[in-house]
Amino acid sequence: MKLNYYPDTDSLYIDLSGKPSTESKEVSEGIVLDYDESGNIDIDNASKKLELNDLTLSHLPFKTHTVAA
């Protein structure tokens, strides 16, 4: 899983799989779900909808990697 934030478009991409999407559906204003077999989530105007300064990961069974912007 990858989280990518693009400040120039204020978009947050949550990639649950590396597969390309085949269908998109806007489920709420600015929240677009890009569907593939596993799913991807694209949130437009993310900074207005989410607190992007803090990310908490709990009880995940893997090593985390931090990349500063």
Image (tube, rainbow, N blue to C red):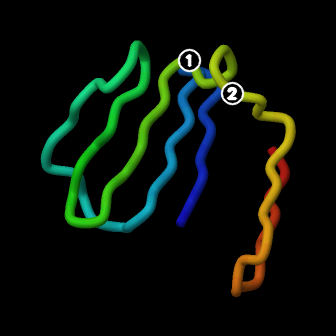
In this view, the residue in front, 17 or 29, is: 29
Q: Residue at x 78, y 63 (%)?
A: 57
Q: Is residue 41 left or right of residue 22?
A: right
> Looking at the rendering, which quadrant does residue 39 occupy?
bottom left
Name the kind of residue labelled 2 in the image: Leu
Q: Residue at x 43, y 18 (%)?
A: 30
Tell which circle, 1 or 2, labels the residue nearer the N-terminal end: 1
Q: Is residue 9 left or right of residue 64?
A: left
In this view, the residue in front, 16 or 8, is: 16
Crowding around mark 1 (Cα neighbors within 10 Å: few <14, some 14 to 19, many 20+) is: some
Establish if 27 lies above or below 24.
above
- Closer to the eye: label 1 or 2: 2
Establish if 62 lies above or below 23.
below
On-image quarter of the C terminus: top right
Name the kind of residue labelled 1 in the image: Asn
Establish if 26 lies above or below 5.
above
Residue 17 appears at what percent x and percent y? 38, 67
The residue tagged with tag 2: helix, strand or loop?
loop
Q: Residue at x 49, y 30 (%)?
A: 43
Q: Are marks 1 and 2 in contact (CB under 8 Å)?
A: no
Instruction: Look at mark 2 in the image and give the residue it sits on.
Output: 50
Instruction: Look at mark 1 in the image and give the residue it sits on.
Output: 45
Establish if 22 lies above or below 32.
below
Q: Residue at x 32, y 26 (%)?
A: 27
Q: Is residue 47 left or right of residue 58?
A: left
Total numbered circles: 2
The residue tagged with tag 1: helix, strand or loop?
loop
Residue 20 appears at what percent x and percent y? 24, 58
Label 1 to label 2, Cα distance in Å? 9 Å
Crowding around mark 2 (Cα neighbors within 10 Å: few <14, some 14 to 19, many 20+) is: few
> Looking at the rendering, which quadrant does residue 60 occupy?
bottom right
Q: Is residue 7 left or right of residue 68?
A: left
